[in-house]
Image: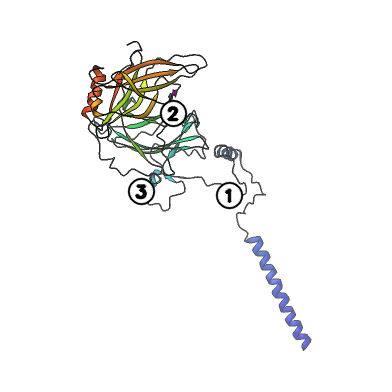
Amino acid sequence: MVAVAGGVIGGALFLIFIGIAIYLLWKTLCLSPAYEELFNSVTPRHSDATINDLTSIQQTSGPHPNNSSRTKSVPFIIPPKFLGQNWVDVKNGERIQEDCEPYVAPEFLPRSSFYSLAGSFAVGSINPDLYKFPEDGSEADFPEGNIGRLWFAVEYEQEAERLLVALVKARNLCFPSESCNPFVKIFLLPDERRYLQSKIKRKTLNPQFDEHFLFQVSSKTLNQRTLKFSVYHVDKLKKHHLLGQVLFPLKNEMPTGESKVVIWRDLEAENLEPPSEYGDVQFSLSYNDYLGRLTVVVLRAKGLQVHEDRGMVCSVYVKVSLMNHNKFIKCKKTAAVLGTTSPVYNETFSFKVDQAELDTASLSLLLLQNMEGDKSHLLGRVVVGPFMYTRGRELEHWNEMLNKPKELVKRWHVLSSSST
């Protein structure tokens, strides 16, 4: 009986073991997953078209720092038909595609000739929440005669030598009707042949751009460059009409600190008058009667007749001298601007002048070109002051400064030769 009982128990355990083995074998063969995880040691095969696509993506985005890590996810585009739907956690590079405005992600897609231009290209849209806007009521307080105002931000990456320009918005554009179709061309002076262009905004005098642009510029020449924003309207015949422009010299104007501060500037009308024989210079005057301080802001010059010598780069600076009874009192100089006959300075100088001396004081501005050695060549000069020394525009500028204390009065002046 004991032997029979042991045999029955052993047979039952053997049958159970056989059943478990059959179940595991069936699960392995019949319930295997449809997809297998590919490890780095396994190289998947692709069709020729897929390989070409991956090659172009890798060439644009550059090599990955770590081959064992997962490939960086590519931002996707939300089609326009889903524009009205509520999207949650859209923060990984996704954006809404606008009608008739293709989206380009330069980080992954190859840059075409339309977006790439001599080391500068558009890099897509910006997030306005990342920028600090000035809390000064700049969208409501427009002076009389204002033709528009432009908001932008500038940042320079020292290691990569890249200048990032964020074009934010424009307000109060001067146009006869609200059917204005504005856009902006961005130049990096002194190069006026190449530019970057924003998207066209339809039927608005207050366009919102929120676009990013990038210029490749060496840190050695950064202080010699000036950003020029030209705001245009395009009509039905696709003709461009200039609404105004902003000049932003990078010297002494680059914001400091890590915060991305948005800057605003009022648009200026283009000076359509042709340059005079020796050129023209633009500067501002202001007098503070309380402090007894005379302020001169040297802005720019145009049409200068420079001497072109082989092997030498054109270098022009402005010398501002304070005179009293035709006697020299004090002088100050701007930095030299290289390689252009229309330099932009935007430098400010102050002189101590008592109110009683305003009838006998004058300012002399000399535009000089650096020559070989320590020599300088006079390109032109202009003198502003009271009736004792000046007439015409120069006298009008001086009197307007006295009639508007503590205000900057800006004007263009014709340069004269050294003999006049």
Mark pair 1, 2: CA separation: 41 Å
Q: Is residue 15 left or right of residue 146?
A: right
The kind of residue on which mark 2 rests is Arg
Q: Residue furthest right?
A: 3
Label 1 crowd bin: few (<14), some (14–19), many (20+), radius 10 Å: few
Q: Quadrant of residue 338?
A: top left
Instruction: Name the kind of residue labelled 3 in the image.
Output: Gly
Farthest residue, direction top: 419
At 37% from the left edge and 29% from the top edge, which residue is drawn?
A: 347
User: What residue is shown with label 3?
Assistant: 84
**Which of marks 1 and 3 precedes in the sequence?**
1
Whole-percent x, y for residue 220 in the image:
50, 30
Query: Is label 3 in a helix, a strand or a loop?
Result: loop
Q: Which residue is mark 1?
A: 70
- SS for dot 1: loop
Name the residue that disc number 2 marks. 225
Using the rendered image of the protein, determine whether residue 154 is visible from the camera's viewpoint: yes
